[in-house]
Image: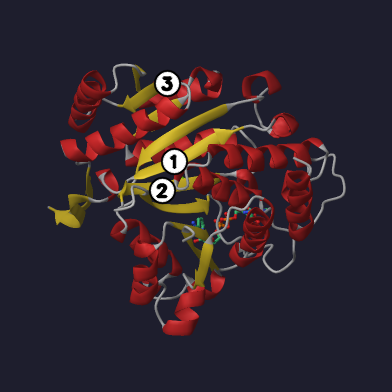
Amino acid sequence: SNPSLLILAGDGIGPEVMNEVKKIIGWYGEKRDLAFDVEEDLVGGAAYDAHGTPLTDATMERAQNADAVLLGAVGGPKYDTLDFSVKPERGLLRLRKEMDLFSNLRPAQCFDALADFSSLKREVVAGLDIMIVRELTSGVYFGEPRGIHKEGNERVGINTQRYTESEIARVARSAFELARRRNNKVCSMEKANVMESGVLWRQVVTEIHEAEYPDVELSHMYADAGAMQLCRWPKQFDVIVTDNLFGDLLSDAAAMLTGSLGMLPSASLGAPMANGRPKALYEPVHGSAPDIAGQGKANPIACILSFAMALRYSFDNGDEATRLEQAVEKVLADGKRTADLLGPEGGTPISTAEMGDAIIAALDAS
Ligand code: NAI
Ligand code: MG
């Protein structure tokens, strides 16, 4: 039977960009004999409107059983006043938590046609292709104790950075595995100079490297120096592995090396399922963009590149992933731009659907 894909388009521009992905999935079924069993369901505000919860148990169950989940975006002003327990974001958090998606892959890739769009010099970013692997389910965002309490007559806000060695080991392995499929190079970032969790991080990464991945080149860097190096000469890196907090900051910074939010895909991977595929959720980095929702202006490329990541990491089809990425590159090289990709000098934007069609035309020509 065909591999299964669960599509959760969500809110705002989520369904608009996902519509273009569905056209591309259709193209693969028709033209490349690569068919998926696609199911669709609700998440976020859309699920709240229908069921009073941002993710039903039934949808959670379908996500657990799918070979891969593709998500659009969740949220919007309509839901801002809802109680935290039913906010759209909680749907996404529940998926990540219950699927135990500990390894967040955030590529920072600069298509040549957009190099002048970056805030950095062309030679610094042109052709950039690096991958940040961020630990996603532990660290300071989750550690206990946490909270705000009174000490004497003032309030104290507390969070705890806590990592077990198995949590470090599994994300390290995922970075080393990734490096073997790329350029065999990992840089691990922490602050072992001032943090105990950083000392342990460096020890465990080094142990896993020596025991299991001696063929991969490993370096270590303090995360603050790493932030500097990322802006100075990002092409020195290939795979960067880091914790949840540093990864949040470093991946957002690295992403902006490449230009628009509308271009950035991501993957969140967990442990292998019975069929050997990792639990996996693919989604664009951007949100539901309520300011442009419903206007046909959204850039579908982030969501389309997320599907390319699914082809590569869930369906072991790097060739077709590359085909899709090259189709995107060709369309950009031809000068086609959604509104978010137009610089101050302007130009005529194409619509969400026109961008999807142009990418399909480029696939046809490939
Ligand atoms: P956002 O990413 O939705 O939008 C930020 C800016 O980038 C906006 O000006 C938007 O128009 C633009 N933009 C984003 N994606 C674009 C695309 N594909 N094409 C063209 N322009 C694009 O972030 P914002 O405004 O902070 O949040 C809006 C809503 O989305 C909130 O409810 C927020 O909670 C939610 N959100 C959801 C995320 C998710 O589903 N993973 C992630 C981030 C925010
Ligand atoms: Mg962030």
Counting residues from the start of the chain, the first of labels 2 and 3 encountered is 3
Counting residues from the start of the chain, the first of labels 1 and 2 encountered is 1
Q: Mark 1 highlights which residue?
A: 105
Query: Ligand 1 is in which quadrant of the figure?
Result: bottom right
Classify residue 225 by image quadrant.
top left
Which residue does the image show at 43% across and 38% down from the upper left? 249
Q: Nearer the viewer, residue 288 or 26?
A: 26
Kind of element beneath mark 1: strand
In front: mark 1 or mark 3?
Answer: 3
Q: Nearer the viewer, residue 174 or 13?
A: 174
Q: Mark 2 highlights which residue?
A: 268
Q: Position of residue 254 (x, y in %)?
A: 52, 33
Distance in Å between CA atoms under marks 1 and 2 = 6 Å
Which residue does the image show at 29% across and 49% down from the upper left? 137
Q: Could you say which disc has been placed on residue 253 in the image?
A: none
Q: Position of residue 250 (x, y in %)?
A: 45, 34
